[in-house]
Image (cartoon, rainbow, N blue to C red):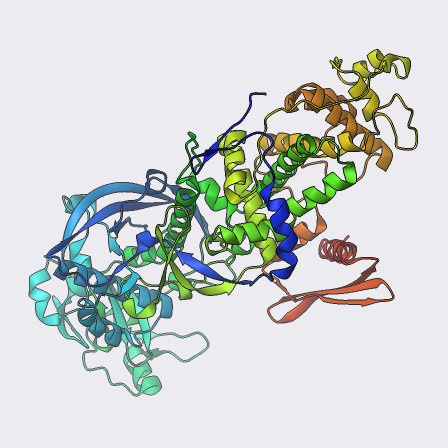
Amino acid sequence: MEPINLEIDGTQQQSAAPLLVEEATQELASEPYDDQQPSYVPPELVKPWGSNDASVLYHCYLIEMKPNFCSDIPVNDIVLGMRSELDSDVANMNFDLGVGKGTITVNFKKAAEIHFSSEQILQCRRFQITIFRILMYHNLQKLEEVLERLSVGQNLEVESIDYLLLPAARMHQRPSIIDWECVMSVPFRSEENSEYHVDSSPPNNCSHVLHTKNGKVCTCRIQNSLVYTPHTGLLYCITGLLDDLNGNSLLRPRGRRARTYKTHYEEKHGIKLRFDQQLLLKGKHIFKVQNYLQSFRQQTEKDSSHTSVELPPELCSIVMSPLSVSNLYSFSFVPSIMHRLESLLLAVNLKRMVLDRCTENVTIPTIKVLEAITTKHCQENLHLESLEALGDSFLKYAASQQLFKTYQNDDEGDLTEKKEKIISNAALCKLGCDRKLPGFIRNKCLDPKKWIIPGDYSGSSFLNEKLPFNEKNIYIRGRRKVKGKRVADVVEALIGAFLSTGGEIAAVYFTNWVGIKVDLVHIPYERQFQMQPEKLIDVRHLESLLNNYSFRDPSLLLEALSHGSYMLPQIPGCYERLEFLGDAVLDYVITAHLYNKYPESTFGWESETYFSEVLGDIIESLAGAIFVDSEYDKDIVFQSIRPLLEPLVTPETMPVNPVSEFNCHCQKMQYIMKKPVVSIQNGVVTRTIEVEANGVVKYRHISTASNNDTAKRLACKEFLRLSKGN
């Protein structure tokens, strides 16, 4: 293959460069890992709260939502206003949200650049704080207090989550892309009723005005509004008037005597309706904000927002008007949408940090970086496992071939020891921490109630930090626990992301950037023995078994087949050095083959031994011999060895790792996995696993084995057997 030389930080990487991490890892044991790591927030979302400018420029994007199912409530578009322009691959992103009936496809589009006055910004903040606090908390507690602080905050130079989320105007309302009438719905002022009055045609026998807690209000103002009923403390979205029901109509609750609405309110709430001739309002319970990014999301309870209630107007206090039920429904999806945007922006900043000084033409899609920093704990439809498997195999291959050509006099044991120091979890964790990677890792699923409402400066506090290399700002929002193994996994997954989209040049670049100095330049294998292999082995027959590969140096074939117990003076050495190299090459080419052929796979497989240990070693040593003889051509290795491996395993034929299947099953069924209890006595490991559902123990199993990993697999296998009724 062609030599790969890279320049990082302006320095050319020479072939057979020393693996600097090898020496550094010797000190890792004395450096304990601190699992309390920062949680980064992208700088695009954090801005100074106050501004002395007469107007502020916002880059506006249209968030289009298209339901892939039939619904009686339409979904409206939303306008996102950002003070920083989004990268092109983020500004045009699309993804699906999982809802009870199906999916909603979300598309981002660049819409316009708009200058907002300070008064407009204040009004936009009032609107979004009100609508999100109502959707998240279902009450009006502290809302007035928070809104009163807005004017004070306008003059403060504090850094806060700040962007605008506004209802999009319908086509007939254009040219403005923003529905300003809806934005101005906070606070509702009954005295401004005439200003917004439209020609309304109320039902028969109904006045143009209704008596409410706010006073007299035009029917056009209450038919699309959000109201609060003090006697119940509940909020409702009003969708119209009921043209055949008033306070004197009969209410027929299930299992009770028939009585009028007027009698019901007097008996149950002690309220006497004064305007019993007024038509009742049709109200819907407001929607719940949920995590719509979860891959295994299920509708666990009945959604009360689909049921209607009848409300006397005089018991309703209007909070927002005009506000349609469609707008309220659409805004309930926003926390999930913005969580995905925030995650993508984290990936953008990580990518910029890595590629800041790259002189090669390396292009990595942001979505791949996001996949590499997302763990399965997020319960989303993308996670790092496939990329981790791919990156792990490449790292093992890159390090093994580097050691093989650098230390040509070392035996297999020394090479393996050096390799383990390089690719160990402890070493990768240390390197990842040095490069500030833990702050980018996503290891928790979205909790919508902890989502920070933009514009509410009182709810956020951030620390400023400089990123290495490009020295750009990043913000820290608290700290969380990140396991050292998870940091190592992300390092490997990022290698996989660069490899899968940018090829080996990009993968070598990232590996060097993170601190493991490798190259893929061919170095001749120095040999000090002269022999005639044909006198000891049938070279031509063996080559025919290897898909007719013809060795340039047949002595490599002899070395690959020579066991350590059978050494003759004319044989240069046993197969172990070539087996060390071939093991890594085969692992890489097979993993890459499976990754490219089955990109939906998660590599959560359980490997099984199909050959005896010695035979497996010989196959690996043959792979190493072909790799060296072909001057590091991996494709030739795969073509030559593949006949010995047929039939190749596939995701359909390879057993699934029971631990991975156990975790997926628990997530899908929404079981809570209790922390396992592990005890060791007389060299025997006992492991107890428990899962709960709704506070009740669903399964419990105890397994014993000679080591913890085996006990874990056995416990998970038994759980899966019981859960499937086998």
The residue lying at 51 percent from left, 30 percent from top is 505
Q: Is residue 25 above or below residue 237?
A: above
Which part of the image, by quadrant, shows the N terminus? top right
Please give left or right for residue 607 compared with residue 133 in the image: right
- Image position, residue 127 (x, y; %): 23, 63
Q: From this view, report whether residue 288 is shown above or below residue 228.
A: above
Question: Quick check: 247 left or right of 400?
Answer: left
Residue 269 position within the rendered picture, expressed as x and y whole percent measured from the top left:
32, 85
Q: How many marks?
A: 0
Does residue 96 appear to the left or right of 311 in the view shown? right
Q: Is residue 650 visible?
A: no
Image point (15%, 44%), residue name: 174
Decide which of 628, 589 is in the foreground and name it.
628
Image: 12 above or below 86: above
Q: Nearer the viewer, residue 449 or 556?
A: 556
Which of the 4 image quadrants contains residue 636?
A: top right
Residue 182: where, in percent of width, then height?
A: 19, 58
